[in-house]
Image (tube, helix red, strand yellow):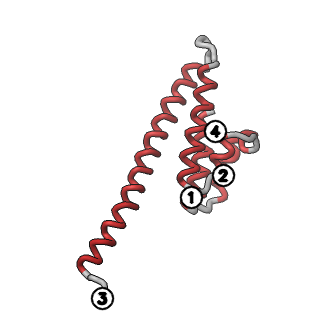
Amino acid sequence: MACHELAALRLSLMNILGVDDDAERQHELAELGVAAEKPGPVRSLMQARDLANMLRFFDASLVELQEKVSTTRADDPKMPYLRSLLVLTKSVELELKRQNESLQRLWRDLEEVHDFTHEIYPRD
């Protein structure tokens, strides 16, 4: 469930950040179990190698999780747990969006700093 989404997200971040830790990778793959082999958003998320795809596949995995929760009976003993997982993954989703916005802002600001450098040191 949501543990799958978070494990896949960690694997994706390892790809993007260049983290080469086989023990961590094996830990997350063990958490995923057969979900690592099943086609779908979780598997695509764990294989994402860039930020745009990571965000897209994380969103898709959350849709899948929300569908699972919506089809679970209200009196199912797992329902409180499932609802907690939705809150947790929503929190992670919002933090990922903030981080993405921050990186986008940095990308734009670098151009401004570059232009300012040329104002101070004009090209001949």
**At x 69% / y 52%, what residue is drawn?**
26
For the residue pair 120 and 59, the one nearer the viewer reads as 120
Instruction: Tell which circle, 1 or 2, labels the residue nearer the N-terminal end.
Output: 1
Question: Which residue carries the number 3 mark?
Answer: 124
| 10 Å crowding of disc 4: few (<14), some (14-19), many (20+) | many
Task: Please report contact status of discs 3 and 2: CB closer than 8 Å, yes or no.
Answer: no
Closer to the observer: label 4 or label 2?
Answer: 2
Label 4 to label 3: alpha-carbon separation = 56 Å
Instruction: Tell which circle, 4 or 2, labels the residue nearer the N-terminal end.
Output: 4
Q: Describe residue 37's horizontal placement relative to residue 89 as left or right.
A: right
Question: Which residue carries the number 1 mark?
Answer: 16
| 10 Å crowding of disc 1: few (<14), some (14-19), many (20+) | some
Question: Which residue carries the number 2 mark?
Answer: 47
Mark 4: amino acid: His
- Image quarter of residue 70: top right
* Residue 4: mark: 4
